[in-house]
Image: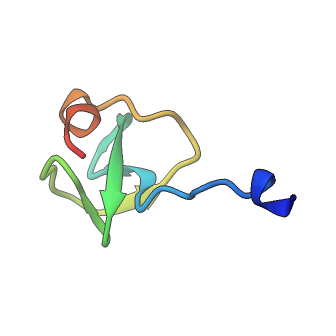
């Protein structure tokens, strides 16, 4: 019964890269999936990067 309560977690976290704090990327292994550069900061917001949304 408890298998119904479990949710599969994604292998990425939402985050921003560099000075652009408006675009939220999928971050995997500390890097944005789309290849954006800059210091990554974790965010609890919906992904807004179109390249990240179409990649994996």
Q: Is residue 49 left or right of residue 51?
A: right
Q: Is residue 43 above or below residue 50?
A: below
Point 58% across, 46% down: residue: 44
Quarter in which the N terminus is drawn: bottom right
Residue 32 placed where, x, y %? 25, 55
Point 73% across, 58% down: residue: 6
**Farthest bottom residue in view:** 29
Point 26% across, 52% down: residue: 18
Residue 46 placed where, x, y %? 50, 33
Q: Is residue 30 above or below residue 13?
A: below
Q: Is residue 13 left or right of residue 19?
A: right
Color theme of the render: rainbow
Point 12% across, 52% down: residue: 35
Residue 33 placed where, x, y %? 22, 53
Residue 36 placed where, x, y %? 16, 49
Q: Which quadrant would residue 38 be assigned to in this image?
A: bottom left
Closer to the camera, 19 or 53?
Answer: 53
Total numbered labels: 0
Q: Is residue 54 left or right of residue 14?
A: left
Closer to the camera, 14 or 4?
Answer: 4
**Farthest right residue in view:** 1
């Amino acid at each position: 019964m408890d298998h119904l309560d479990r949710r599969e977690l994604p292998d990425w976290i939402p985050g921003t890269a560099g000075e652009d704090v408006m675009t939220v990327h999928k971050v995997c292994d500390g890097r944005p999936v789309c290849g954006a550069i800059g210091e990554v900061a974790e965010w609890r917001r919906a992904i807004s990067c179109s390249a990240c949304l179409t990649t994996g």
